[in-house]
Image: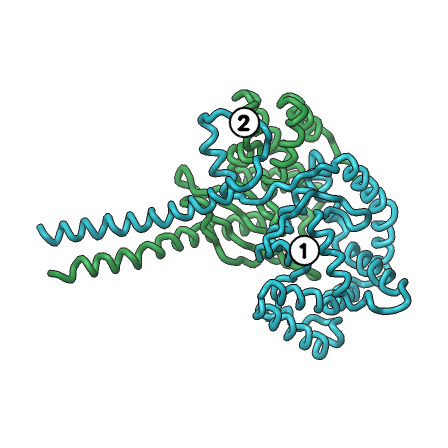
């Protein structure tokens, strides 16, 4: 009888512990959720959906980014779209036609490798020292064994491939919010924070220190064309699957950046 | 006699994480077998001809309908806006939205060539929801595609797909939110009807 009671008590204890842990997590995410700005301005009366909505939003804690410049941004978005179909895509197509894919992959590897200072400095600024070290190993390995970074022998080892960090992500890690949404000409979707981050990155990009000025400009454009040639239908795919392409690209960008900050 | 509760406690502590990870394993198995089923149809040499493409598509559609929970997807894609919909509108929305998704995404996976799929870890999101990581590996790159699956009514069903960290359901929700700020549910339904009934969606 005594044994049964202790068994029962221990049983309850374990269950309580289990649910206490579950509840603590629930409250934590709930607190994060309530600190975010409300999605819509209107107040809604509590009803049967509210609990379900809370669960839904708790499962996907991605910040809401304001868009006060929407009219202006949509104009830039239309311009970028026009530029993509009339200039970037035809050029990337033609380039892809005369350049075999393995060559283009090597060019992509080279540009990724040379951007090492951006990742290194931002790993340090985010106190991710282990990853800074891994990135350095990768740079040394690919620059030597991989012949100036054209080959990517490091790809085989997952520990040599930490997720890339940039200045915008560093600001995010420091707790700086996105600010408002902004569409940059040629560069595409961004936010105030990440646009400033892009400027920071350009100081850390070694190619930009090559003189005269048109060399980094040309290299940057070439990298863009090369990248586009390797993912030729990506833009069209997202655009085609959208009911409001402007919003679809905005949301995809915000989600993608949020994930990058959290990694 | 005195040690018994301690042993029971120990067993329970050991059993708890095991049962949780066992569920994650089952979710991983579900995703793996589902992807394999889709790949089997895609790789079937019987559908190599252009003329059999429509038959292959029909087969894929029937299969995909058993793998995804379109009601759950539709509810999630509408989010808060679900309140503005009558039950009839909701039914039509669910039907149109699933046809819309099939129209767009089945076309794309039918263009599948020689990509390989690798499986990563399964993360527990809540008591019956799991996210399973997969990677589609092509010659030039890796595309991370994660599936969110839910266990309800004694079966697993997919309710969201994340491509490179972007949740499709959330992406559609942000669009529906925007459209419904200015327009009525009926307008949104009309927009979907137009998209679904259009023969080809123009590219440029």
Marks 2/1: CA distance?
Answer: 33 Å
Specify whether A53 is left or right of B114. Answer: left
Task: Give SS at disc 2.
Answer: loop
Q: How is the image coloured?
A: by chain
Residue at image coords 56%, 23%: B85
Residue at image coords 55%, 41%: A36
When asked about the image quadrant of residue A97, the answer is: bottom right
- Residue B111 image offset from top left, x and y in percent: 69, 48
> Which sits in the foreground, A239 or B112?
A239
Tell me if residue A145 comes above or below residue B85 in the rendering: below
> Which sits in the foreground, B181 or B158?
B181
Task: Give SS at disc 1.
Answer: helix
Numbered mark located on residue B75 in the image: none
Quadrant containing the C terminus of chain B is top right
Residue at image coords 54%, 20%: B86
The chain in green: B
Specify whether B130 is left or right of B184. Answer: left
Tell me if residue A132 comes above or below residue B14 in the rendering: below
Q: Furthest-bottom residue in view?
A: A144
Circle 1 crowding by C-alpha within 10 Å: few under 14, some 14–19, many from 20: many
Q: Which residue is mark 2?
A: A43
Circle 2 crowding by C-alpha within 10 Å: few under 14, some 14–19, many from 20: few
The shade of chain A is cyan
- Residue A101 image offset from top left, x and y in percent: 77, 62
- Residue A122 image offset from top left, x and y in percent: 65, 64
- Residue B135 image offset from top left, x and y in percent: 59, 56
Q: Which residue is mark 1?
A: A168
- From this viewpoint, is residue B20 visible? yes
Quadrant containing the N terminus of chain B is bottom left
What chain does badge 1 belong to?
A
């Amino acid at each position: 009888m005594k044994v049964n009671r202790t068994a029962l008590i221990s049983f309850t204890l374990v269950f309580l512990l289990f649910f206490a842990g579950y509840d603590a997590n629930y409250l934590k995410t709930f607190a994060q959720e309530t600190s975010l700005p409300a999605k819509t301005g209107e107040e809604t009366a509590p009803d049967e959906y509210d609990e379900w909505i809370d669960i839904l939003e708790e499962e996907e804690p991605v910040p809401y980014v304001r868009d006060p410049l929407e009219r202006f941004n949509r104009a830039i978005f239309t311009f970028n779209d026009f530029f993509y179909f009339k200039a970037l895509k035809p050029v990337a197509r033609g380039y892809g036609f005369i350049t075999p894919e393995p060559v283009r992959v090597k060019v992509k590897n080279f540009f990724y490798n040379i951007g090492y200072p951006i990742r290194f400095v931002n790993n340090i600024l985010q106190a991710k020292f282990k990853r800074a070290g891994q990135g350095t190993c990768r740079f040394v390995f690919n620059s030597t064994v991989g012949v100036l970074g054209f080959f990517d022998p490091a790809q085989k080892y997952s520990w040599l491939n930490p997720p890339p960090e940039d200045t915008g992500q560093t600001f995010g890690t420091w707790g700086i919010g996105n600010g408002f949404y902004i569409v940059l000409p040629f560069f595409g979707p961004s936010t105030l924070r990440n646009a400033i981050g892009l400027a920071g990155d350009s100081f850390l990009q070694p190619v930009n220190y090559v003189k005269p000025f048109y060399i980094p400009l040309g290299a940057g454009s070439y990298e863009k064309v090369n990248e586009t040639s390797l993912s030729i239908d990506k833009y069209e795919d997202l655009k085609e699957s959208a009911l409001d392409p402007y919003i679809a690209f905005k949301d995809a960008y915000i989600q993608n950046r949020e994930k990058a900050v959290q990694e | 006699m005195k040690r018994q509760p301690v042993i029971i406690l120990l067993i329970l502590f050991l059993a708890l994480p095991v049962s949780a990870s066992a569920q994650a394993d089952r979710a991983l198995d579900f995703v793996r077998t589902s992807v394999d089923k889709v790949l089997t149809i895609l790789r079937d040499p019987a559908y190599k001809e252009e003329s059999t493409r429509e038959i292959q598509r029909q087969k894929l559609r029937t299969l995909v309908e058993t793998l995804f929970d379109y009601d759950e997807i539709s509810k999630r894609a509408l989010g808060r806006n679900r309140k503005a919909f009558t039950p009839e509108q909701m039914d039509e929305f669910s039907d149109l939205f699933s046809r819309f998704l099939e129209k767009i995404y089945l076309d794309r996976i039918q263009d599948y060539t020689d990509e390989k799929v690798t499986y990563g870890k399964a993360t527990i999101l809540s008591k019956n929801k799991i996210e399973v990581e997969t990677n589609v590996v092509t010659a030039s790159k890796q595309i991370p595609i994660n599936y969110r699956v839910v266990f309800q009514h004694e079966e697993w069903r997919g309710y969201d797909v994340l491509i490179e960290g972007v949740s499709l359901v959330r992406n559609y929700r942000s669009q529906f939110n925007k459209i419904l700020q200015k327009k009525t549910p009926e307008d949104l339904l009309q927009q979907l009807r137009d998209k679904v009934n259009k023969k080809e969606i123009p590219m440029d």
